[in-house]
């Protein structure tokens, strides 16, 4: 019995850990990314940073800005700009829904994680989010500590 090997078996799952601490997620979506050849190779090497990235609308299309993809080490002259704007690919219905909610006061679109699916395509999970206040952050930290203590006691 032979097992088929997928060339994309290496799991790429890069998370924006700061996002869940700074924002309360209202809704999440999975979007495709328009990348160049050297960019996708760097993503497969997990050389991506989402900490300062944010999404915005321009002419009815959604773009991501300040997402850092490191230059590909094997590309000599034909490398990409590491922090260029990249277009996100969503259905028209999803874009319209996101744009109407985005126009509300206090909501923003934050990248949560980037991953490579089983077909080898880079996908970005984005969240429609509302910023947390300081007391909300403290409450979340207390709940996490309490959960951790309960787990220690049970084991």
Image (cartoon, rainbow, N blue to C red):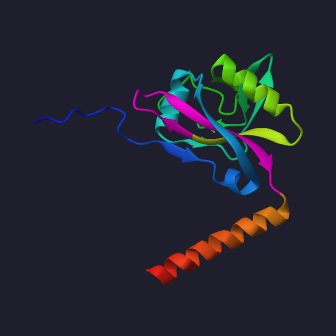
> Would you place residue 73 above or below residue 18 in this image?
above
Find residue 89 and report its horizontal and vertical position in percent: 62, 22
Quadrant position of residue 27: top right
Instruction: Tell me the residue at 84%/63% (across/down).
Output: 134
Residue 2: quarter of image: top left
> Farthest residue in the left direction?
1
Residue 71 at least partly seen: no
Asked where in the image residue 18 lies, by quadrant, the reply is bottom right
Q: Residue at x 75, y 54 (%)?
A: 22
Q: Main secondary structure of the magenta part?
A: strand
Asked whether residue 116 is drawn in magenta, I would say yes
Q: Is residue 94 above or below residue 146?
A: above
Q: Position of residue 132 (x, y in %)?
A: 80, 55
Extreme-bottom residue of the structure: 153
Residue placed most toward the observer, 32 or 36: 32
For the residue pair 37 and 112, the one nearer the viewer reads as: 112
User: For this view, does 131 lie left or right of residue 121?
Assistant: right
Residue at (48% x, 30% y) in the render: 41
Please give the name of the residue rendered at 63% of the width and 69% of the height, measured from the top-left corner: 144
Determine whether, in the image, residue 100 is placed left or right of residue 81: right
The count of marks equals 0
Residue 12 included in the magenta stretch of the image: no
Q: Which residues are magenta?
A: 114-132
Q: Position of residue 24 (x, y in %)?
A: 74, 51
Q: In the image shown, does 6 or 96 lie closer to the viewer?
A: 96
Q: In which quadrant of the rendered image does the N terminus lie? A: top left
Q: Is residue 74 left or right of residue 105?
A: left
Nearer to me, 5 or 1:
1
């Amino acid at each position: 019995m032979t097992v088929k090997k997928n060339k994309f078996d290496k799991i790429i799952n890069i998370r924006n850990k700061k996002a869940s601490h700074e924002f309360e997620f209202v809704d999440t979506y999975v979007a495709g990314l328009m990348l160049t050849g050297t960019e996708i190779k760097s993503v497969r090497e997990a050389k991506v940073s989402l900490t300062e990235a944010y999404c915005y609308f321009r002419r009815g299309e959604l773009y991501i800005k300040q997402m850092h993809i490191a230059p590909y080490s094997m590309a000599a002259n034909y490398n990409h700009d590491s922090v260029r704007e990249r277009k996100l690919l969503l259905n028209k219905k999803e874009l319209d829904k996101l744009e109407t909610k985005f126009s509300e006061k206090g909501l923003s679109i934050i990248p949560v994680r980037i991953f490579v699916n089983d077909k080898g395509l880079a996908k970005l999970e984005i969240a429609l989010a509302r910023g947390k206040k300081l007391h909300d952050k403290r409450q979340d930290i207390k709940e996490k500590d309490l959960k951790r203590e309960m787990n220690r006691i049970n084991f």
